[in-house]
Amino acid sequence: MSEKLPKIALGTDHAGFLYKEFLKDKLQACGHEIQDFGTYSEDSVDYPDHIKPAARAVADGTCDLGIVLGGSGNGEAMAANKVTGIRCALCWDESTGRLAKEHNDANMLSLGQRQITKMKAWEIVVAWLEGKFEGGRHQRRIDLIETA
């Protein structure tokens, strides 16, 4: 019996729209169910309007994981991390993506479309999805974050 793939929330502003569409297609081709919180074009929007609903979907269990995108990914990570229970990591290569899951149990990933190539974004997503939380000393540190 195969393992159920996580349902993934996607959210972006206009500056991450093209990568969101690319990643959505790739993830669906792999069998992931996607909930897309927009935006749905390259027209200028306020990123919290799309990032916070995606983060809430992860926090409340509607989705298992989330990926948010923007020009740099910084504001998107900040907005997602305002939602209780979210650990959103801004990543720029496979190593940071994998470690975000292994050490920080990141349930959301933030990427900057203006900072990395489309294929690099996919490689980061794959590394993050394949990473397994190591627990132990890392859980103790996550517990300290959650009680800050």
Image (spheres, grey):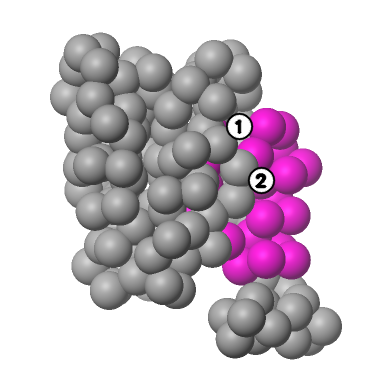
Residue, x 55% and y 26% (percent of image)? 72
Query: Which quarter of the rendering shows the C terminus?
Result: bottom right
Query: From where the camera sits, is residue 38 visible?
Result: yes
Task: Give me the disc on residue 97.
Answer: 2
Residue, x 29% and y 73% (percent of image)? 61
| Residue sitting at the far right | 137
In the displayed structure image, the side of residue 112 where residue 140 appears, left or right? right
In the displayed structure image, the side of residue 80 where residue 62 appears, left or right? left
Under circle 1, the secondary element is helix
Q: Which range is magenta?
A: 91-111
In the displayed structure image, the side of residue 107 where residue 9 appears, left or right? left
Q: Quadrant of residue 22?
A: top left
> Against 103, is 17 above or below?
above
What residue did someone put label 1 on? 123
| Residue sitting at the far left | 40
Amino acid type, label 1: Glu
Mark 2: few, some, or many residues within 10 Å (few <14, many ≥20)? many
Q: Are marks 1 and 2 in contact (CB under 8 Å)?
A: yes
Amino acid type, label 2: Gly
Query: How far separated are the C-alphas under marks 1 and 2?
Result: 9 Å
In front of the other: 74 or 114: 74
Mark 1: few, some, or many residues within 10 Å (few <14, many ≥20)? some
Query: From where the camera sits, is residue 24 visible?
Result: no
Residue, x 50% and y 48% (percent of image)? 78
Whole-percent x, y for residue 126 in the image: 56, 41
